[in-house]
Image (cartoon, coloured by chain):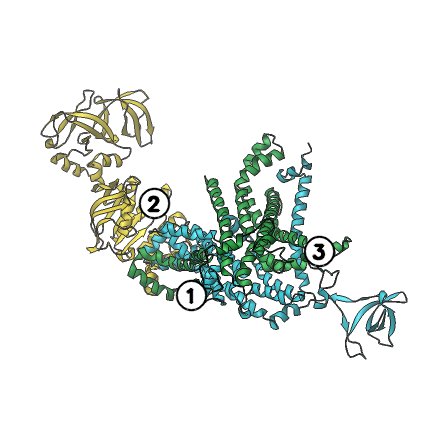
Chain colours: A cyan, B green, C yellow
Amino acid sequence: MSQGLSPIAFLTRTRRPGRIGLTDILSWAWLVLGTLAVLIPVVWAGLSSFKPAAEITRFPPTLLPRAAVQQTVPGFDAPLSLWTVDVDGKSREMAMVRRIGLKAQMVDPSNPGPPVSVDVKSMSPVQRLTIATENYTDPLTRFDFLTFLKNSVFVTFVATLLTLAVNALAAFALSKYRFRGEKAIFVLIISTLMIPLTVVMVPAYLVVVGVGLVDSLWGIIIPTIASPTGVFLLRQYMLTIPDELIEAARVDAASEFRIFWRIVLPLTAPALAVLAIFSVLWRWNDFLWPLIVLSSRENFTLQVGLNAFQGEFSVQWNYILAMTFLSLAPVTVVFLFLQKYITTGIAGTGMK
Amino acid sequence: MSTPKATDLGGRALDFVMGVVEAPINGFERLMGRKRMPYLFLAPNLILFGIFTFLPIAIAVGYAFTGGTGLFVSERPFVGFDNFRQLLQCEDYLRPGSCRESLFWTAVWNTLWFVGFNVAATLLVALVTALILNRAMAARGFFRAMFFYPVLLSPVVIGLIWKWFLDRNGLLNAFLQMLGVPPEIFLLDVGWSRFFVVVVSVWFHMGFYTLILLAGLQAIPKDLYEAAAIDAASPRRTLFRITLPLLGPNLLVVLILLMIRSVQIFDEAWVLTNGGGPGTANSFIVQYIYQMAFGSDLRLFGLASAASVLMGLVLLALTLIQLRLGRKMES
Amino acid sequence: MGNLKLTNVTKAFGALTVLHGIDLTIDNGKFVVFVGPSGCGKSTLLRIIAGLEDISAGGIEIGGRDVVQLSPAERKIAMVFQSYALYPHMSVRKNLAFGLENLKFKRSEIETRIGEAARMLAIEPYLDRKPRQLSGGQRQRVAIGRAIVRNPDIFLFDEPLSNLDAALRVQTRAEITRLHRQLRTTMIYVTHDQVEAMTMADEIVVLNAGRIEQVGTPLELFDNPRNLFVAGFLGSPRMNMLKGEVTAVGEAGVTIDAGYGAPLSASIDPAAAKVGQAVLVGIRPAHFAVGDEGLPFVVQYHESLGTETYVYGTLEGRDEQIIVHQTGHFAPRPGDLLRIMPLSGRVHVFDPDSGLALPQSVSQRSDVHEHA
């Protein structure tokens, strides 16, 4: 049988121990290529973000961030660049004094005598691994990136805290009480899952203007706090907390709010953690809504700032990439540590 | 007693804050009784939903029937179906240039093409990946995480990373040069830029759909495969007669979800293509709405709302199909 | 004080009425068991007393105080739940302290009470453990401890032993009884297990379908079941029932013919019965003498438990199963024909239509009490 050659077979055959078939090779090839496809653009951008401005547009590009080496040579005021030069069939390092057409004037950096004339074709620059930290420090100090960063951190932190509090309270009411209108309210909240922001963004903007939150960080925090996904996730989890615990607390003279924060909230910690992770990612990555609401530069979040920045400094890729990486880093760290939580959370709720 | 730990201090701080918050809430409970507490607990959520979700929905439809450039409904003249007429007036819908609102129809056609290619490509890639990951692979967790990683990134970041990758001096051109192909400015070419908007979208989202499909595949009982193996079913028959039919409901849900999300393409395409370029090659419906309402000094809120309503109707239809499928799946 | 008075307590969930006007008085310091089949409303009644459920109509007084409008905390009750309902994220100590903290007790007072309760229940070594680190029996004791520290007027137990294994159940039963003797506080205990009811209660309240069937001491209920339900529910194996007819009414009781030409005499108030009346005769398995005369009993099989033997069979020519209990070893073969005779004064007679027991004659009633 030649099943191993059919492309269908490679998708369905289960592995047998001790035999590596074509199916396994194709599967691994797909996965490895896929992983490379995911990683290469990200890693490439990451490596590029450390390249000095002069290097970043070099084509063909070098893989690692490198820069020409310069050295101060006795007798010259400015530092000179180092080159590898072929002189009399021997390769040696020399410093370039000046360049005239196809000839360059070179001196020995350690023992500068009279300059030697060298053919440009026979020389190549000496480069060392250099990390251009100024790509990161400049935007944070000279441009507004520190402000953007502060705004993003503030929005993410405050919105996540409020999201947890407001939705946990609602989920508590919807899971641990029986009251008139309970079902209707739940359906009403869940139905808002179906209304994407893109459909209501014009009137939502009007409302934000109406309540005076336009061009304010609160204008992107407050409208996003009430989350149907959050209510749903927390409610489903709270339903698994036995009602007898609530009753025991009532017999123990706890007020309803005390039951919420001393009993229910601690026991909902796993679901709260999942919601917190999602909320952080949502708020940190949010783009369209902040783009609409925020208009003055000092209120921009990182994403909006990044977008504005690339329009203004379209050629300064070293800065753009550095800031891109600054925005990507926390998400990557969160993912590295909480990968299991996130993937099972999404598989369990189908949300994103 | 042991010395207080940091967590103890945090706990005490929380206790203090909650103690302050608690007092008025307990007062409410004493005054109104335990039975009314759930309403109090729901209030913040419902007020926020009311103001920022339900109110906009109510306004959205009304807005679409007004004109002018005023922001508040009171400042806006009622214009009936004018906005819709403006959007829909066309000699030949296949030629956006012949329409009164040619930008809108360009966006509609761009979006339709994008949805078609993106849905097909994402579904195919996600399904193949899920099928492979569903086999007893070593390092399954690693690969699942790897493919999922881009899902968590911001669309702006993804737009910028790919823009750099596709740059005239980018890695892709360097690679092509090694093969002897002359460099290309991909994002300034109509065909290439459209192609890469789909590539980036697949790259961005496929991990999410892979995860959902993988969950569906893992829910198929293993003994079915064992029974099929005993019944000497070929791999092709196993795939088409067992795996895909049982995955069918998940596939349909993923398909609809993908459509709903693809129709709303905006963020990453906006950043990647510098706002829909070259020209209007990558101008999509959400971008049209955004530009009409906020993008310039036009402030055509009525026209934007009318376009929103039309898109909302399409999304609503897709959602209803999804709900119906979901119900069928449960029964 | 911990006396409880329920008047016409009614509970309805929508159209479904689960408690039909319960009237009940419980004296201070009594150990009262609510028993009945599942769904009879016993747990609902307990939760109503606790204040965890509202009542649709009626009144509740604890210590002479109307508590209908009061929250559980204000009723001065404490409850031990079926699942124990220990707060899983708190240590045992914090579990015990939680209620007292809510009532704003002083730290020192809380510590004292926890210390006392822990000593009484021998849970001192576990005070700093979390509930999940405890065995079932230890959790049970912590749950009781949480009730004790509150120093309540009434303890409420909701099937507290149902999650324990058989051996532990017997042991904990004895501990709760000991605790009651020590504390002398009113305890109300819900169970579906008649052995628990019989062994622990000062007074048993038998509930069925939202109504009280009978209230009394365990032996009162055993000896004088008021109706067919109580007769069938208490006692294991269940009481045998024979159809019969009153053939004579005399000064000392009535004579009943259950067929087979063996008249059965029962000490029934002569005023309550008349000749020709159809009745159901109830005889507990232990109240038969096996001998030369009596009803013809065909053996099907027997179960020997060593110190006692249950013989299963039917009366000759009939289908209803009859169980006969004998002490010691007794091994009839299947198909053997035995003669069985009810012990005198141990014959219960019921009206088949109303299900009520016919009242016993006065002399007989006192006789039974001497037995007890």
- Which of these two is toward me, A2 or C30? A2
Label 1 near label 3: C-beta < 8 Å? no
Residue A32 picture location, percent across and down? 67, 49
Q: Nearer the viewer, mark 1 or mark 2?
A: 1
- Which of these two is toward me, A11 or C242? A11
Residue B236 picture location, percent across and down? 62, 35
Q: Nearer the viewer, mark 3 or mark 1?
A: 3
Judging from the image, mark 2 belongs to the subunit labelled C
Q: Is B247 placed left or right of C149 in the picture?
A: right
Q: Is A68 placed left or right of B325 in the picture?
A: right
Residue type beneath disc 3: Leu
Structural distance between the alpha carbons of marks 2 and 3: 72 Å
Question: Which residue is denoted by mark 3 in the rendering?
Answer: B172
Judging from the image, mark 1 belongs to the subunit labelled B
Q: Quadrant of residue B36?
A: bottom left
Judging from the image, mark 3 belongs to the subunit labelled B
Label 1 neighbour load within 10 Å: few <14, some 14-19, many 20+: few
Residue type beneath disc 2: Leu
Q: Quadrant of residue B50?
A: bottom left
Residue A151 picture location, percent across and down? 53, 67
- Which of these two is toward me, A29 or B19? A29
Pointers 2 and 3 within a single chain: no
Label 2 neighbour load within 10 Å: few <14, some 14-19, many 20+: many
Residue type beneath disc 1: Arg
Structural distance between the alpha carbons of marks 3 and 1: 56 Å
Residue B111 picture location, percent across and down? 58, 51
- Residue C195 versus residue C304 in the image, above or below: below
Q: Which element carries disc 3, helix, strand or loop?
A: helix
Q: Is B73 placed left or right of A309 in the picture?
A: left
Q: Quadrant of the C terminus of chain C?
A: top left
Question: Which residue is denoted by mark 1 in the rendering?
Answer: B12
Question: Which residue is denoted by mark 2 in the rendering?
Answer: C161
